């Protein structure tokens, strides 16, 4: 009886982790390529330069927004990996799809920075976040169905992880919906939510 | 008797793994550099932006195609690494050549995205995949000839690995040949094969 | 009682380390994107090419300056990580903020290279270094308050780490202030300080 | 007595390894950014595209040359790391300088690709290789002076490592000197030497 390729491939959790950390590290650092130094020909004084730098501030904002987005999803992926005993091929593929969405963040960010007042740009950015959330949820479902958890993981962890993802996505969706008023409302709300998740201080109910 | 440099170099499987994961992570993330935000000067309304984004869809397709390609070959390389006890210098060099072909994928992808209706672009993309397959096969031959496998690897694994690579390459070659009709036929076929490998569901005979 | 997400997330020191090494590696390598080969159309002889290469020397200087800056902060972060028993979510977030500042170095460098005689460019570069120092100090405070140190770390280490960061930042601030005379004074001073830290030879008192 | 910062920093060989693998992986993958897809506006037929691709072949050659160069120096660095028991701060700094030279390879390569008939470009490329060799030698000297080797490393290893670096650099220098005739002679010779090192077959005396 031939050995199934499925039995061989994709079991190595360490390599999935290393690939993920690599993709996150590159995506985070590529965000900076969107910050261009002003063109020298247009700058004739310190004042011109300060002016040109001030004009970069929306891009700095989207830079920080996306760095936080990537940080949050890196943490979310890590929270799952920490609980796993091993990986398998299906889980590997869900995480590769997740990484494909991670790699899109520099594009979505560049689009939002260039068209920060356009609803289409904001909604596409939010779609990217939504896909990240859905794939993280899908990864968790695979983990549970396949029994890939460490044996000592308490049952309540399941609720904590699912609740966290659902809560966060509900808040992001609400934030995206705020763009019917103005994109800046959306961005301000999403950044507040992210700061809340990062500091885990003012938004106690969403920590659980 | 002087110690051969060969005895010192290239034994460290962990570093070969780390280098490989790094190259795959960077290549995957560089794919996104091919997705450019539309030029702001040409966009005057939400409709313009949606239009410009729709025009990006062939590039999004090649992005996903190449991310899957890289995912499949990352899995294939990993499947071999999981079975190894150690590396040696020759195996190291075969994998460095493999990584050189991996690094070319962002170029082949950009070419295909730009010239998606040209047979030359499609065949070059396929050649890149072919080289990846051949080098993975070469790596496996080195592993076997040098006895680098873990002692408890069952003999049937050999067949599973070789069959898998040959099957996949046969399907890719058939897909590439479909470009005599139309490039879209080739792309659709190759993506189906890849989805089949990734989900391992509808294409049972190719799993073995 | 639901399990707090905080208990699950961010404990894995290894992954924080891997993400950090990845971001540093990419940021270091992206610096080279600022060195452009001269435009072929403008070069008609070996003399032209040598001339064009000589014109790149300020950029080579800022390349080396920034590589050293990144090297120093990589060492500084590593010095802390070596002493840790584990990470937690708050420490993870401080280091993600630190990595966001690390990723900005290629931008600050490009700006300084393009506007090497402008005080605004120099001060922005220094601000980037200042933020790196402050976040490293913040990380150390979190480590101490949370008791994340290995049990066998002697108490004097605290003083060594804090003194080092404060000394270095005082010297960088002094160097930046030298730009009231001329940017070249600032750059020469900062590079000397960095060489001093790197070789740890001529500047004995700052080693402690 | 305050604890010297030197005692804390730079001891972690694993992180130096991870940073190195990261820098090599990114530098290898950035090489591809030098291969641009032809401009669509200039291509009107399959023949045009094949023509434009053929015009890329010098760049493909420099791509492969540089990938091999990086592969060789990655192997060389790895050969040293495999023998180490630990790292220290000085060794860390020599390797950071080495990585700065590694990161320059994509620039030297782009320069050589753009000006493949110019001696200045070839000599600068060779200088980059020379610096890599010298720093690898310097790293080995630090290792020996500081006693960082594993206790079971036989004394003959020293000769093997030094001989290897000196031999290789002598051959590269000879190759570079061939540019007095023609750059293509230099490139052909250097590639032959590298293939010799990689396959370790036709150049038996240089293996030792």
Image (cartoon, coloured by chain):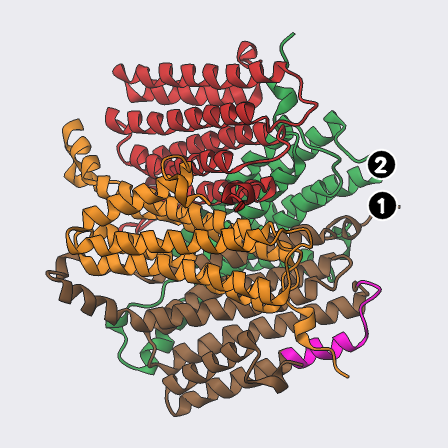
Chain colours: A brown, B green, C orange, D red
Image position of C149 (left or right of B201): left
Q: Residue A20, relative to residue D208: is it above or below?
A: below
- Pick out the residue farthest to the front: D1
Q: Residue at x 52, y 44 (%)?
A: D19
What x and y, as percent, mark residue C139?
52, 62
The magenta segment: A150-164
- Residue under numbered circle 1: A2
The disc at residue A89 is: none
Q: Quadrant of residue B51?
A: bottom left
Q: Rounded to the nearest whole Å, what is the CA distance between mark 1 and mark 2?
A: 10 Å
Observer able to see residue D120: yes
What x and y, as percent, mark residue B97?
54, 34
- Pick out the residue farthest to the left: A44
Image position of A30 (left or right of B96): left
Chain for mark 1?
A
Q: Could you tell me if the residues under marks 1 and 2 are in contact, i.e. CB atoms within 8 Å?
A: no
What x and y, as percent, mark residue C49?
19, 33
Task: Find numbered disc 1 in the image and state the secondary structure of the residue it sits on.
Answer: loop
Q: Residue at x 33, y 49 (%)?
A: D45
Q: Residue B128, relative to residue A28: is it above or below?
A: above
- Pick out the residue farthest to the right: A1
Q: Residue D101, relative to residue A104: is it above or below?
A: above
- Crowd band around label 1 with a 10 angstrom C-alpha radius: few (<14), some (14–19), many (20+): few
Image position of C8 (left or right of D147): right
The disc at residue B155 is: 2
């Amino acid at each position: 009886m031939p050995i199934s390729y499925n039995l061989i491939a994709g079991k190595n959790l360490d390599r999935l982790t290393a690939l993920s950390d690599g993709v996150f590290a590159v995506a985070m650092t590529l965000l900076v390529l969107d910050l261009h130094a002003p063109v020298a020909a247009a700058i004739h004084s310190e004042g011109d330069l300060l002016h040109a730098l001030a004009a970069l501030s929306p891009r700095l904002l989207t830079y920080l927004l996306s760095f936080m987005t990537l940080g949050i999803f890196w943490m979310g992926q890590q929270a799952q990996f920490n609980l796993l005993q091993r990986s398998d091929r299906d889980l590997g593929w869900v995480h590769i799809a997740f990484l494909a969405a991670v790699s899109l963040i520099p594009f979505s960010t560049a689009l939002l920075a260039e068209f920060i007042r356009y609803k289409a740009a904001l909604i596409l950015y939010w779609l990217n976040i939504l896909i990240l959330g859905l794939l993280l949820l899908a990864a968790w479902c695979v983990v549970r169905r396949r029994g890939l958890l460490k044996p000592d993981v308490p049952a309540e962890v399941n609720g904590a992880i699912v609740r966290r993802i659902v809560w966060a996505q509900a808040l992001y969706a609400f934030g995206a919906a705020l763009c019917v008023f103005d994109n800046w409302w959306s961005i301000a709300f999403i950044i507040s939510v992210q700061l809340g998740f990062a500091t885990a201080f003012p938004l106690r109910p969403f920590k659980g």
